[in-house]
Amino acid sequence: MATSAYSPRSSNAGPFALDVDYSSAPILARLPRGRHGLPQEFVDRNHRNRLLAGAIESAAERGYPAMTITDITTHAAVSRGAFYRHFADKEECFLAAYDIAVGWLIETVGCALESSENWPQALATAVTATLDLFAADSRLARLCTVEVFLAGAAAVARHEALVEHLSAPLCGGRAESPLGAELAPQLEQALLGGAISLIARYVNAGRGEHLPELAPVLTELLLVPYLGAAAAQQLARVA
Amino acid sequence: VTLPAAAVHAAPPVGLVGGDRRARLLGATVATVAERGYASATVVQIAAAAGVSAADFDRCFAGKEECFLAAYDLAVEWLEEWIRAALAAQREGWPGDVRRAVQATLDLLALDPRLACLCGAEVLFAGPRALERHRATVARLAALLRSGRDHCDWGGELPAGLEETILSGAIWWLARSARNGDAERLGEIAPDLTYFLLVPYLDAAEARRLADRR
């Protein structure tokens, strides 16, 4: 059983590969009724994971503002008492679920970036991997690009930290750019802000599963300020 | 629109000095939301900041969301009027108009950075109706950029939605700058922001040159 909080999704993992290897453990399964003799630690972890999965489901279904703790516990098939053993309120539960989704995203991007020494190629791979991840489970896309904005100041701060984190690999473009030194320090923030808005527009239009078709567009968009339009277009279409 | 030469940070937003109860509430909304964020701001706080009673608030607006949307609409109206005025003064066509529109936007936001919080950040946090308005604003502003497609050989190949995407990025940039307290230096980012908006349509060096032109 993997113990990393942010376990990468294996190709056949379901949307809720939370902190365990989903393929080998029915971690989200309901526990047997009555006295089952399972260790308390196992029960707690099972409940927590089901609650997090329930939060992702509820946020996608009703949106963060409308979603209630009852929605979460209903999806999770866990008692309200168990909810409060793990989380103080809806916000805390949402943030924990968001952190897990972001962990997957960061892992996915990180793996993709390591796939090539060539910066434009690595970036293109990361864009494709991100869109594939979101398309495989558009609830994650909704969580990371729509609901996070509606979930209060702590969630927005986490979103900003994510953008900050993703800016670093994008900065690699400065070394490739003839204009490197003249590029604005906030360029990466603006590019990612635009990229996130584009993904959000797809999600809001109910087109989450079509996100991979954006890969060339998004890659081109991210390359343009560094390489210029002509080179960016060429590289994005080859990649 | 008449605007004061300088706006004090704590003052009511540009254009809303004095005015009736409703106007005071809109001004208080801009201030309260910028200070506390939409999610944490309450009707009671907004009413208090406006110096009116909660009952007066209820007479003017159905709730926090209605009040926020009215404040947003007003702020965007100023912004668009401000841009229109700047462009009317000297029509240059693309890309000169883009540079002038950027400068006009930054000038307005430097007068009252809270407008950047309202129109760039809080509108994203205030629910689906606010988001719909944000999308409409971006779509209107995108028209100004879109003429760039006629200025490059690859205009026809550029993806639909390019303008909306880069504008959303630019707006995020502005909102971040305003939130991080870089508001006073907003005017300085005009060339960088212009470059960001022009570069999909031009050779990068050419975009830089045009963006740096005063």
Image (cartoon, coloured by chain):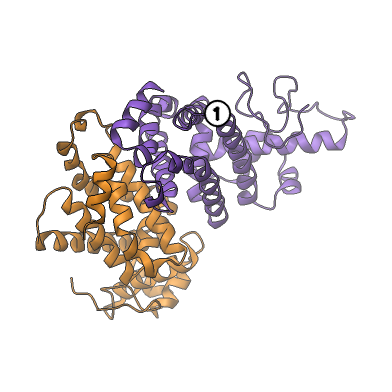
Residue placed furthest toward the right: A37
Please indicate, yes or no, whether residue B16 appears anywhere in the rendered image.
Answer: yes
Q: Where is residue A4 in the image (x, y as percent from the top left)?
A: 73, 35
**Rendered-image quadrant of the N terminus of chain A:** top right
Q: In this view, does B148 lie above or below A114?
A: below
Tell me the element at label 1. helix
Residue A83, quarter of the rendered image = top right
**Rendered-image quadrant of the C terminus of chain A:** top left
Q: Where is residue A119 in the image (x, y as percent from the top left)?
A: 48, 32
Residue B68, quarter of the rendered image = bottom left
Residue at horizontal 19%, vertical 60%? B83
Task: Give the side of residue B31 with respect to residue A77, left or right.
Answer: left
Please tell me how crowded label 1 is: few (under 14), some (14-19), or many (20+) other residues with Cα within 10 Å.
many
Name the residue nearer the viewer: B18 or B158: B158
Disc 1: host chain:
A
Residue at horizontal 28%, vertical 75%? B16
Task: Give the side of residue B60 with respect to residue A72, left or right.
Answer: left
Per the image, the residue denoted by label 1 is A112
Residue placed furthest toward the front: A178
Residue at horizontal 49%, vertical 66%? B36
Name the residue nearer the viewer: B118 or A188: A188
Chain corresponding to purple in the figure: A
Residue type, mark 1 in image: Ala
Chain corresponding to orange in the figure: B
